[in-house]
Amino acid sequence: MPQDSASRGQWKSRIGFILAASGSAIGLGNIVFFSANAYQFGGGAFYFPYLIGLFAIGIPVMALEFGLGAFSGRAFPETMFRIAGKKGEWAGWWAILNAGFITMWYITILGWVIGMLVGSFGALWEPSVAVPAFGMESGALGNPHAFFFRMLSSWWPVIFVVVIWILNVIICRRGAETIEQATRVFVPLMWAFMLILIVRGLTLPNGFQGVLLLFSPDFSVMADPSVWKGAFSQIFFTLSLGFGVMTAYASYLPKNSDHTNNAYVTSLLNCGFEYIAGLAVFSLLFVFAVVPQASTLSMMFFILPQGIAQLPGGAGAVAGFGALFFILLIIAGLTSSVSLVEALTSSIRDKFGVSRKKVLAYTGVVGALGSIIFALPMVVNPSLSDDGTMGLTLTDIMSHWNFDYGLLLVGLVECVLVGWVMGADKIRVVLNANSKMKLGPWFDFLIKWAIPAVLIFLIGWDITNEIRNGVYGMPFNANYADKYSLMKLAPALSIVVWLGGSAVAAAIFTRKGSYK
Ligand code: PHE
């Protein structure tokens, strides 16, 4: 039994919607992934492709996703069904179920943040910690590095991910109504926490030098397609695009809302937050000469905490700023993960009319089991030279597929279906109907030609690299015969499970039942 608009729920006010949508956009991506990417791709030079990505892809696709929600008043799969029939519906479910995997992965990372938060009250800052599980000498790793791996190789994260899933279910329990209540508290709070961190970072002796690092461009890197791929994937991820999340949120708005304006406001709030988060992160890193060379996760879990550990003001200040940083990550991450859970919940309810309670119960249990897989503590790499535990290895592989392909691929499918099957001009009419700022035919050109062409080029470039260097940088002739051989197959297996699994599940969801 499909839902009518009244029983689907609505935002109480435009502010409520903007808080929820920007809460979805602002998350781990803004605080950690952006700075790590920016650093990896040459500091200041990253901004140029990033800004082009924001204006040429991010804002138009955000407007498109809002427009889709306004056009149908439904979640993503039903919207796609109305555009392109069963094939469109299948693509819609595929995006939503793909997002399901991302949700499990994202929530595991948030679970680890709880562990770090607990540590920030003491253990995290101790001068050295033995890592008995790895047979390492006491103090072989500096804290918080050692603390992080010790936590990861315990079963604690399994409890933490369950806690985060429970919080998600609680926040989504009455849909838009309870999400709005939560974001009204969390979103202002995270801006406040971020401002405190920036003031602390910039007022440190030499804090400003770090900011210069972020602005000293190395333009030579811009000839490298991987910088553009990094910037565009970051834009998709940070704006929560390509997973039907923004369409679900916009479907809870009155039809006559100004969606173009909403797209600008949401995108600029998100990127403004990202920008100032970069200031905070880079000032801290510079002052304490800790360099984010390693992966994005290590940046969040031990490089930044290493900087915090050196803050002046004694143990109290260190613990205080440490806790503040981890609480900030948790609330920013929660307002993002609930949008993923809600996008899935509303999609299932739109089609099958099942009660919200039931959908949330199933999603919560299946999701928590998935997140637990990403949190498995078995040690697969005792040297800890890169990934260490089974969970971390899988998490890292997931990040690779997600950032290198998943985000760009779903964006491509979305632009092609809307641009070519529905007609970009139709969605432009929907958007322009209630907008002060009218979109011109350039919008159609972007959605039909420019964005797909760029995405196809970047995905193709990536695939070529993968073939040349081996899947996930693992040469095809690697020695698979040692003790950890199964883990070496994990990169290739995981992409089959992830893309194949969600494609099959999408087909099942599409075949079962029908829309009115
Ligand atoms: N935008 C969120 C972040 O920056 C992540 C996210 C992606 C949330 C996709 C929802 C959908 O952390």
Image: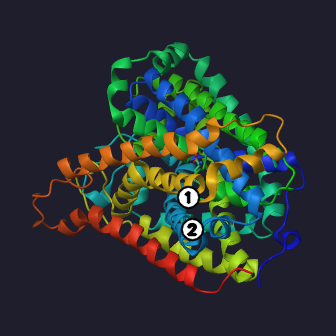
Residue 201 figure quarter: top right
Q: Badge 2, how many Cα within 10 Å: few under 14, some, many 20+?
A: many
Q: Nearer the viewer, residue 420 or 323?
A: 420
Residue drawn at x 84%, y 66% as measured from the top left: 9
Q: Position of residue 362 (x, y in %)?
A: 62, 80
Circle 1 Cα neighbour tier, 10 Å, few/some/many (<14 / 14–19 / ≥20): many
Label pair 1/2, CB-CB below 8 angstroms = yes
Q: Which residue is mark 2?
A: 88
Q: Secondary structure at mark 2?
A: helix
Residue at 67 percent across and 68 percent down: it is 82
Q: Is residue 242 left or right of residue 222?
A: right
Q: Is residue 131 visible?
A: yes
* Pick the front one: 418 or 284: 418
State how far apart marks 1 and 2 are (Cα): 7 Å
Q: Name above or below for residue 441 compared with residue 45.
A: below
Callout 1, which amino acid? Leu
Percent position of residue 396, x then y: 37, 54
Q: Which residue position is annotated with label 1?
A: 417
Badge 1 marks a residue whose secondary structure is: helix
Q: Nearer the viewer, residue 306 or 265?
A: 265
**Residue 334 placement: quadrant:** bottom right
Q: Up-down: is 493 above or below 459?
A: below
Q: Position of residue 205 (x, y in %)?
A: 54, 13
Kind of residue at disc 2: Gly
In the picture, residue 510 is in which quadrant?
bottom right
**Residue 196 marker:** none
Whether residue 115 is visible to the viewer of this picture, yes or no, is no
